[in-house]
């Protein structure tokens, strides 16, 4: 969710122009740097220890190298994604307060919470060669004493984007309002219904307090690394962040408030005006609570685990009782008056990722994902349903464009409910369209059109950025089928292709493993699997509904599977 200084929208044909805030008067403002002691108190890492910044040419021979003869044209796109990503690795600047090297979307002079969390998810596959999950350290290091974390921080100075700082010391408000028209920018106060206005006022505005997905990113990393000490280090910052969002963003009905910054120019935003509740932020908080409960259990904090589980269960019940529309079989945002907003967006699918939906509700959401009139477009999954009034078949940013972050949310949610085949279908559809656009343009884009094989209008180019998720993570996990479980020292390989497939130098749990599956020359119905590993682990081979488990030893093994 980016800052755009100008967006002119005509509600009839939705023609609008965008210019970034680079060099603008708004971006030129700088907030006053808080005292060093006021930020980062929950996070143990206090200083950056300089080390050489990773370079693509130096590390290419150590990165995972995919093999996928079914669609070999996706492999060059994989390497292009890494090449672009390496351009965006940065070292902390002196005086910034940053403590770790980081990957940045290179959208502006700032780092972004949403962007960074998603970028860590494809960097996980090359841990520890690249600064992936450690990129989040810089947000924890700039956390306020009350727990607030700004979603947008200048990467040179370490201070929040000026307009997101509550310099007036007013009760919570949105600096840029809910409609995202910028004609003119208009501040709007948050109205609390059925609860007292929280005091003291927050350090930041509502524009900056959204998308609490740090814990999701940390748990995705844990699946690749098994690093429990990392979870121990981030637990207190995460709890502080959770509590402050609970303080300021919880509406009187128990659900959570958001504004335009959730999905920039979406037609949903008008219905959230003043303090309406978003299905995305409410489910993200339910997921956050559930993940904190999991971490607390692993870290020997049983009372915390019980408390966070209660929070998650309560939010699940509220989302289902207030946001589910039984007639339309879909989840909707709530207006300030508590009425369900009429706009059908991809935000509803956070209910799957947060495990909020019941099996029958999940089935109804899946039906929409298969419905060409709404979400089953040529390029799946658009951010606005195609039967909505303001849907833009060319993308229109959050009025229909396909974005890697929301597609990742959808497919991970489908995984939660056992819709593995549909998750893979959507992931490979995304790869297919990206591949076709890559062939035409030679690069990777910020978002994509839903109804044609084209970049979205508008969309930034050379964008890695979250768009690295498709060529890197989707190819390895949903194409080739490699899914690690580092805490259990396990690797599952879903062998869905009959063509040669695998990955050299796959990284997980401290291991470096090369795996290749190809037709057995002695029996065409069997696959020959060659595994080279630097350590022992359990390999689960899955093919056509059958599972074969092998204890892999250090060295090379050749296996055969029906």
Image (tube, helix red, strand yellow):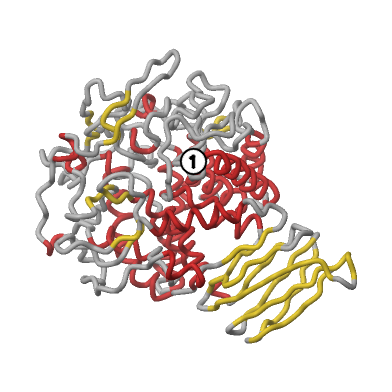
Drawn side of residue 515 relative to residue 307, left or right: right
Q: Viewer-proximal residue, 57 or 193?
A: 57
Depth check, front residue: 4 or 225:
4
Estimate the x, y position of residue 125 in percent, counting from the top left.
Answer: 51, 65
In which quadrant of the rendered view does residue 3 lie? top left
In this view, 215 is above or below 460: below
Residue topped by disc 1 = 403
Please identify the residue farthest to the bottom as the structure is shown.
554
Q: Residues within 10 Å of mark 1 (few under 14, many from 20)?
A: many
Of 538 and 496, nearer the camera is: 496
Q: Where is the N terminus found, in terms of image quarters?
A: top left
Which residue is pictured at 42% across the width and 43% down the height? 282
The residue shown at (63%, 71%) is: 491
Residue 315 vs residue 364, the one in the foreground: 364
Asked if residue 306 shows in the view, the reply is: no
Against 337, is 136 above or below? below
Q: Residue at x 62, y 81 (%)?
A: 533
Instruction: Pinpoint residue 407: horizontal percent, then vertical percent.
Output: 54, 44
Q: Position of residue 521 (x, y in %)?
A: 86, 71
User: Does residue 11 lie above or below 346 as drawn?
Assistant: above
Q: Is residue 21 left or right of residue 226?
A: left
193 in relation to 71, above or below:
above
Relative side of 22 to 166, left or right = right
């Amino acid at each position: 969710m980016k800052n755009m200084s100008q967006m002119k929208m005509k509600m009839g044909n939705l023609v609008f122009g965008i210019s970034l805030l680079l060099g603008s008067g708004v971006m030129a403002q700088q907030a006053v740097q808080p005292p060093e002691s006021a930020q980062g108190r929950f996070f143990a890492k206090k200083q950056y220890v300089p080390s050489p910044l990773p370079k693509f040419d130096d590390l290419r021979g150590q990165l995972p190298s995919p093999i996928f003869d079914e669609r070999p044209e996706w492999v060059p796109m994989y390497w292009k994604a890494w090449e672009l990503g390496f351009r965006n690795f940065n070292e902390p600047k002196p005086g910034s307060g940053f403590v770790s090297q980081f990957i940045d979307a290179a959208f502006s002079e700032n780092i972004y919470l949403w962007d960074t969390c998603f970028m860590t998810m494809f960097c996980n596959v090359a841990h520890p060669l690249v600064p992936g999950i450690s990129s989040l350290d810089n947000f924890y290091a700039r956390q306020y004493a009350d727990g607030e974390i700004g979603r947008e921080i200048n990467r040179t100075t370490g201070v929040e984007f000026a307009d997101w700082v509550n310099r007036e010391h007013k009760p919570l408000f949105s600096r840029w309002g809910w409609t995202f028209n910028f004609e003119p920018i208009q501040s709007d106060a948050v109205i609390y219904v059925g609860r007292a206005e929280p005091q003291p006022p927050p350090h930041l505005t509502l524009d900056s307090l959204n998308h609490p997905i740090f814990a999701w990113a940390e748990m995705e990393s844990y699946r690749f690394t098994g690093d429990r000490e990392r979870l121990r280090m981030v637990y207190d910052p995460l709890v502080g962040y959770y509590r402050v969002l609970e303080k300021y963003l919880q509406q009187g009905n128990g659900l959570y408030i958001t504004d335009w910054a959730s999905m920039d120019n979406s037609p949903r935003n008008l219905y959230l005006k003043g303090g309406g509740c978003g299905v995305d932020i409410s489910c993200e908080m339910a997921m956050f609570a559930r993940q904190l409960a999991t971490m607390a259990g692993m870290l020997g904090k049983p009372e915390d685990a019980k408390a966070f589980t209660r929070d998650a269960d309560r939010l699940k019940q509220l989302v289902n009782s207030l946001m589910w529309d039984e007639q339309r079989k879909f989840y909707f945002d709530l207006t300030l008056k508590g009425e369900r907003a009429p706009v059908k967006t991809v935000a509803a699918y956070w209910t799957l990722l947060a495990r909020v939906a019941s099996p029958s509700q999940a089935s109804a959401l899946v039906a929409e994902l298969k419905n060409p009139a709404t979400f089953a477009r040529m390029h799946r999954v658009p951010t606005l349903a195609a039967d909505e009034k303001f849907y833009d078949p060319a993308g229109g940013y959050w009025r229909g464009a396909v974005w890697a972050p929301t597609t990742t949310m959808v497919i991970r949610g489908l995984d939660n409910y056992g819709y593995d085949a549909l998750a893979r279908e959507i992931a490979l559809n995304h790869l297919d369209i990206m591949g076709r656009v890559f062939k035409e343009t030679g690069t990777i884009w910020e978002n994509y059109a839903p109804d044609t094989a084209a970049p979205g209008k508008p969309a930034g180019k050379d964008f890695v950025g979250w768009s690295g998720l498709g060529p890197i993570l989707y190819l390895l996990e949903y194409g080739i089928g490699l899914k690690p479980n580092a805490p259990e020292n396990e690797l599952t390989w879903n062998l869905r292709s009959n063509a040669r497939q695998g990955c050299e130098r796959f990284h997980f749990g401290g291991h470096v493993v090369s795996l290749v599956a190809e037709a057995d020359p002695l029996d065409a119905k069997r696959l020959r699997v060659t595994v080279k590993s630097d350590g022992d682990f359990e390999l689960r081979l899955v093919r056509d509904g059958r599972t074969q488990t092998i204890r892999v030893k250090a060295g090379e093994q050749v296996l055969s599977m029906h």
